[in-house]
Image (cartoon, coloured by chain):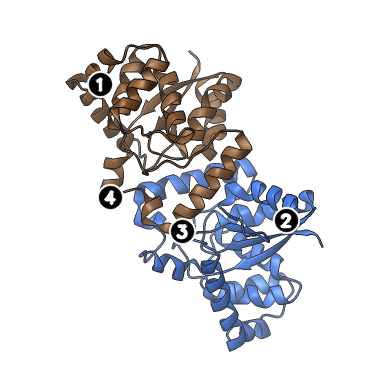
Chain colours: A brown, B blue
């Protein structure tokens, strides 16, 4: 069994964008399997007393984040556009991602959603955008949207978010390993891969 | 004139410890001059509505930080002991650092304070520890402590903290460049040095 890293993210989370774009090639290089775990930060923020992103609640922190993300994307050669509004309500996108992760197009869909939001400035909180993203991937949208709004997937997302909270997640992106380590932030991706490789890959 | 990076830190700040230990050799390698800028995070946190460290206010965030710092220090081969209490009130240490930065022992003193607190588990909020740290550096403690508690240094620390806030600082460590860029966090040290080198060193 190859070493595995769980990659937790929220489609509204800014630093989840570079992490989602970087994780697959870095994991391949490290010989680590990655499991995409989309979840909702909203309920976790709410439990901390926050009604929106801390980047909105704390303006100095928010100003730095936008500039930092811009510099980071420039260094990584990733296109970047600041999404408006921020954060975007990603419930439908997240449920659709869960549908895709049960099939074989989940990772591609997640990257496409991040690209739509942070590279192309599209509204991922609108069903029309999700339909377009699916269509661009040559996936028939109607059955996906139907499954995304049916009870089994709704329950799965609630459970995935509850599991994130049980694992101690408080932000995104985060990475967890089989031996219970939690790494928070795009900045920790390389370290998390080293850890995963060392502990469950040997 | 060599490229310069301003290194802003608070002695109570956990991630300021690895940053303070790493900055000099990395800056030397990059050909960048570093200016140590100790300040007080307390008034800045207070302006954000926080009465203590966010790592105490948000337990999940705090749990991750301690484990992350432990992993980080292990990778860097830096000794680490969790300080008790946390955070420690660093007013006297910070004022003494300003005295030293006017002379030629400021950077060494700052590193020694961080080592006392995060490697040796000593109480840097006690005058006895500051006296010991000075003595170990072969600096006569009494005149330093007297200067640290006289009005000019007190005023300088207030001004330094006000300047940090004007520059948009909201946490520590932070790095600022002559062209107005702000980088937050130990994770951004390398990038800040690259930026400083590129912009005011050429």
* Residue under disc 3 on the same chain as residue under disc 4: yes
Q: Which residue is mark 1?
A: A148
Mark 1 falls on what kind of element?
helix
Please report contact status of discs 2 and 3: CB closer than 8 Å, yes or no. no
| SS at badge 3 | helix
Percent coordinates x, y for residue A46 in the rendering:
26, 47
- Give the class, few, some or many, for how many residues have Cα within 10 Å of label 1's Cα (few <14, many ≥20): many
The residue at which mark 2 appears reads as B24
In the image, residue A188 lies at what x, y percent? 53, 38
Secondary element under disc 4, as helix, strand or loop, is loop
Whether residue B13 is visible: yes
Mark 4 to mark 2: distance in Å?
41 Å
Closer to the eye: label 2 or 1: 1
The Cα–Cα distance between marks 1 and 4, rounded to whole angstroms, is 25 Å
Which residue lies under the disc numbered 3? A60
| Circles 3 and 1 in contact, beta carbons < 8 Å | no
Q: CA distance from mark 3 to mark 4?
A: 18 Å
Residue highlighted by disc 4: A51
Q: Earlier in the sequence, mark 3 or mark 1?
A: 3
Q: Depth check: give the residue in front, B194 or B81.
A: B194
Label 2 sits on a secondary structure element that is helix
| Marks 2/1: CA–CA distance | 53 Å
10 Å neighbourhood of mark 4: few (<14), some, or many (≥20)? Answer: few
In the rendered image, residue A39, in percent from the top left (x then y), is placed at 33, 32
């Amino acid at each position: 069994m190859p070493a595995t890293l769980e990659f937790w993210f929220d489609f509204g989370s800014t630093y989840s964008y570079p992490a989602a774009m970087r994780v697959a090639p870095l994991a391949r290089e490290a010989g680590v399997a990655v499991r995409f775990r989309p979840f909702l930060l909203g309920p976790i923020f709410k439990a901390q007393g926050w009604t929106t992103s801390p980047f909105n609640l704390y303006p100095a922190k928010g100003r730095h984040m936008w500039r930092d993300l811009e510099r980071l994307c420039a260094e990584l050669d990733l296109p970047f556009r600041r999404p408006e509004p921020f954060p975007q309500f990603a419930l439908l996108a997240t449920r659709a991602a869960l549908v895709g992760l049960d099939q074989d197009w989940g990772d591609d869909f997640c990257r496409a959603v991040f690209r739509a939001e942070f590279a192309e400035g599209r509204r991922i909180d609108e069903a029309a955008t999700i339909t377009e993203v699916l269509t661009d991937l040559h996936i028939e949208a109607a059955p996906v949207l139907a499954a995304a709004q049916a009870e089994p997937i709704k329950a799965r997302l609630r459970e995935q978010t509850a599991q994130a909270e049980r694992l101690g997640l408080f932000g995104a992106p985060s990475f967890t390993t089989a031996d219970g380590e939690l790494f928070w932030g795009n900045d920790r991706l390389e370290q998390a891969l080293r850890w995963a490789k060392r502990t469950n890959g040997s």
